[in-house]
Structure formats: C-alpha cells, structure tokens
Image (cartoon, grey):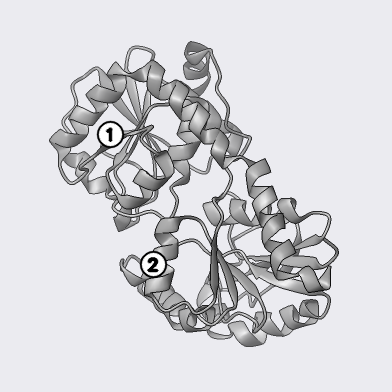
Amino acid sequence: MHKTVAVVNSASFNSGIGRYANFLYEALRPNSLLLNLRMDKNVIFDRGETINGISPPISNGWFINSLLYDQVFNRKLKRKEKDAVIHYSSIVGKPLKDSIATIHDLFFLKFDDNFFYNRWLTDNLKYYRKLEDVITDSNYVKKHLIDNGFEGRITRIYPPVSDDFAHIEDKKKIRDQLGLPHEKILILVVATKDKRKNLKILEQLKLDDGFRIVSVGCTVKDSITFRNVDGEKLNLIYNACDLLLSPSLDEGFGFPVIEAMKVGLPVVASDIEIYNETTMGKAVLVDTSNANSIKVGIKEALSNIESLSIEGRTLALKYSFQNFRKEILDFYENILHDLL
C-alpha cells in the first residue's frame, strides 16, 4: 500500500479510543501518520504530531475548540488531505468530505451523562452518516449505524487487545507488589462513572467477608481503587484478581472483558447483545439488573475457573493485533485499489 493514511485522534492514549488510534496507526505503518487534535489542553500526547487548539487560561479549552472546530482544526487537516487519506479514529467534529471514520458506538444518543458533549456529537453525526466508508467495532454497532441512517459501506473489524495483557503465574507475588490482600477473593471492576456502566447495582450486591471488590477507574462501594494506570500495571491487576465483573447496560465492544480473558481471568458480564457476540459463550452472562443473579454468576464462575480461563485465553487470540492489521490492510486495499 503506497497511499499515506493520516490517523486523526483526539483522546488520551490511556483511553480506549486513544489506544485504538495508536493500533490503527501501527497497523498501517509505514504508510501512516498520527495526528492528535488537542481539544483539551490537559491531554498530553507522547507520540505523533499534535495540532494544538485554543488554550484559554480559565478552562481546559474543550468547549471553545468544539465551537470553533472547523476553523481551528479542519483548516489544518485540509493541508494534510492533499497528500493523505484522513481516517478519524472516532467521531469528533465535522469530517472532511472524502475521509474515512471508525465509529465505536452511538451511546450519546441513548445516555445523558454529558449534555454538551453528547449534543456536539449528535450535531456532527449527520456528516458521518454521509461518508462512503466507515469501520465499526462489532456487528452490534453496525446494526445501530444502519438503523440510524448511515448511507455508505460499513465494515466490521474487531479491534485488537494489546499485547500488554498476558497471563502471569505468581498471583501471590503480584498481590504483594500491588498491596492487595491474600486471603480475599478479589472481584475486579474496570469502568468509568458513565451511567451505562451500571455500577449502582453493585451497591445492592451483598458479598460476605471473604470477597473484596478491586476497581480500576472509580471507587465502587468500599473497593480497593486504582486510577490512571498504564497497560503494564493493569495487566498486573488483572492477574492479581479472581474474576472480572462487567455489569454494563451497553457497550460497543467492551475491552476489559476481552483483556481479562487474554490473561485467563474468568468473566461475569451482562447478558446483553454485544457480550453475546464478543464472548461467544466463554463468559458467564447474567441479568445485571438483579443483584442475586450476579451473585449466582459469580458462584458459577468461581466453580469453573480452569475451564473459563482456558477457553477465554483461546478466544482472545481472535482479537489479536495481527488479525486486526490484516483486516485493516485488506480494507484499504479494497477501497484504494485505484490509488495503489
């Protein structure tokens, strides 16, 4: 492939979208650029080229940069467009006409966690509907895009799970390293405070003293909480725990579930369409509107640790970077064949 692809990213590389942008950039190398739109002055990019937005002294700058997105960012992106195909790694502002985008989800149409941000995405969605080619993370999201009037070709390419995640044998040593208790069964939750993560149900989850919740992202009940962790530390946390619990109401893909499987951690998750698609029967799926159903699922997972661990690690191979890279290159070979 000889045409350069400019991957446009606006998220921290510690976020799921930021990691995806980096995967996309790596998959297309050496024919790729990584362009970071700094809409929030507090976001620091440690790789690629950064296009700075307005940086006001009294705010993070996101609001003013969203209002002036076309003037601040698209003018600069148009210069890149002369020599490269623009590929947005997620929905941001108004896309350039002949660009490509990856759409991870349409949560902003269903949940009201952030009014201004959701309104901005909704206003820009009409432009993404008209793109000739978009990529999405799952068949579940692809159906939603079709239902929401996307007019072009929609290609489902599962995102990869980082090679940062791998099984480590010595759980005792890892718990010592992380300061986690040895005598407890540790239930891991990796989530933000978004409503769709359904963390409120955990307040109703009455576990005996032999259990402890470990949380990455935000505090849940009396959890042992880790924040701002990199991939290496997150891998240690996965390996230190006994199972992953994901009670989400909705996901576009659900990285923590597959990351946990990759290290051999049993998974208890919501019985929702996306998890039925991605876990393929290798996780314990439960009604996460019911705390008792979750408890039953936890008991089932702990009774089948070995089989769930083996099956999960095997399934996770499906979501490798090698598979992702092949599908991304095939995608570009198909749509750019006349330019190659």
Label 2, on which residue?
A: 144
Element carrying mark 1: loop
Label 1, on which residue?
A: 222
Left or right of 212? Residue 209 is: left
Which residue corresponds to the image point at 65% horizontal and 87% vertical from the top-left?
71
User: Which quadrant holds residue 308?
Assistant: top left
222 vs 241, nearest the viewer: 241
Left or right of 303? Residue 151 is: right
Amino acid type, mark 2: His
Q: Check the image and report above or below for 75 versus 174.
A: below
Which residue corresponds to the image point at 23% horizontal and 30% vertical from the top-left?
297
Q: Nearer the viewer, mark 2 or mark 1?
A: 2
State the mark number for residue 89: none
Picture coordinates of residue 77, whole percent (x, y): 72, 78
Left or right of 62? Residue 215 is: left
Which residue corresponds to the image point at 60% horizontal and 33% vertical from the top-left?
232
Asked whether the beta carbons under mark 2 and mark 1 sit within 8 Å of each other, the answer is: no
Q: Quadrant of the C terminus?
A: bottom right
276 vs 128, nearest the viewer: 276
283 vs 217, nearest the viewer: 283
Q: Is residue 58 visible?
A: no
Q: Check the image and report above or below for 23 versus 303.
A: below
Amino acid type, mark 1: Asp
Sequence-wise, which precedes: disc 2 or disc 1? 2
Q: How many angstroms separate mark 2 from mark 1 (CA)?
A: 36 Å
Q: Quadrant of the N terminus?
A: bottom right
